[in-house]
Amino acid sequence: MPYAVWKIKDGEREEKLPYFKGDSCKVDVTFVNPTADKYVTDGTITPWVYYGNSPSTYATDVDIDVQGTSSQGYPRRNYKTKYKKATSWIYTCGPLAGYSVTNDYYFYKSNGALVTVEQVNEETGETEIVPLQDEELVNSATMNKLVSKFHMDNQDIGVNKFTWKIDYMESSGSYNTGFANLMGNLQYPLYTKHPLEDLGLDGAGLRTSVYGYPVLTFHEYSNYNYNVSNPGVQYEYIGRYNLNLDKGANEAYGYELKTKNPYNNTSIKNTSECWELSDNQGTWTAFKFPDAASRELGFGTTQEGSPNRLEMIRHFEYRYSAYGD
């Protein structure tokens, strides 16, 4: 099954993963998908299929932090990794091995083969694969375009932000990622309509739920003197995580679209918004009070006895807006 290795980069803390939300640092991430690597190497799947479905990659200086607050009391935390500011992020298998994940590449629709556009780097003298520049070829119906970023399970939406969820309280995954996959599977979906389609827009490839799958995760101690009699690189098995599409991967849900809203001629990106319940134990989300009078007291009141509207606001978070949270 897929596995990942994390190597902490910051100073003398390489033995210490982030411990609480805000305890962020830099990490090198090796992600390996052994089955997919085997299939693309022996020709069972095409490069187009491989690079659109969780290919193996290596990234340096990725931002990592504890995700959320609920897992801070677990023996293992949930984590969030952000690749936007990574120093490098490359493929490690297939015909694009060694080349950047953040470039666009093109493949023939007929056989899924990579369209190799090569040029010599004047500084290094090495031959490099570069994004296709031929407009006639790009605009033709014979090309598939793999946009930059990492594709988890489809060739349409690439992302650079992920949640690593330990599922400590519910280890089967069926209550979380498993159910989301069942409802939002792009190949065999139970729910096929994206809300943007109500506006007459194309919602193909966009999700209404997270996506994820199990990944074995390891922590590398590089030159850490954990055992005097056996110095060198040590590996600690952290756990069986779910590698999930992060809720902040806006592009996967349609919140980054520059497509115009037909009703106001303004891009979706600049008009979309979402109100998220931010306190899972709050009065507004727990339905603790059966009648209006007791519910009003539960929401908090001012000294004059009127409802405290600020107490209500505390339970919601404004997300996906062009104006920020």
Image (spheres, rainbow, N blue to C red):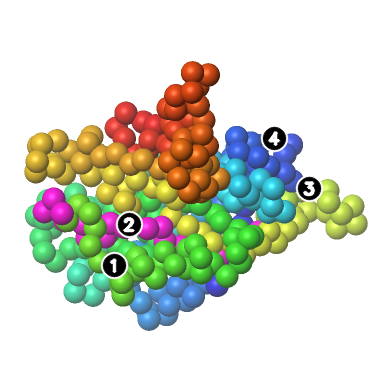
**Residue named by callout 2:** 208
SS at circle 4 = loop
**Residue named by callout 4:** 11
User: Label for residue 191?
Assistant: 1
Q: Is residue 185 left or right of residue 13?
A: left
Q: Are marks 1 and 2 in contact (CB under 8 Å)?
A: yes
Q: CA distance from mark 1 to mark 4?
A: 47 Å
Nearer mark to the viewer, of 3 and 1: 1
Q: CA distance from mark 3 to mark 2?
A: 43 Å
Nearer mark to the viewer, of 2 and 4: 2
- Tell me where residue 217 appears, x and y as whole percent: 62, 60
SS at circle 3 = loop
Q: Can you say whether 146 is above or below 325 in the image?
A: below
**Are there few (<14), some (14-19), or many (20+) residues within 10 Å of tag 4?**
few
User: Label for residue 224?
Assistant: 3
Q: Is residue 34 left or right of residue 45?
A: right
SS at circle 1 = loop
Q: Which amino acid, by three-letter code, is at mark 1?
A: Tyr
Residue 314 on the magenta span? no
Q: Are marks 1 and 4 in contact (CB under 8 Å)?
A: no
Question: Mark 1 vs mark 2: which is more N-terminal?
Answer: 1
Q: Which amino acid, by three-letter code, is at mark 4?
A: Gly
Q: Residue at x 61, y 66 (%)?
A: 171
Q: Please name whichever residue, 297 or 308, is drawn nearer the observer in this view of the structure.
A: 297
Q: Can you say whether 116 is above or below 20 in the image?
A: below
Question: Mark 1 vs mark 4: which is more N-terminal?
Answer: 4
Q: Please name whichever residue, 117 or 222, is drawn nearer the observer in this view of the structure.
A: 222
Q: Which amino acid, by three-letter code, is at mark 2?
A: Thr
Q: Which residues are magenta?
A: 198-218
Residue that protrudes farthest toward the right in the picture? 229
Asked whether residue 211 is in view, the answer is: yes
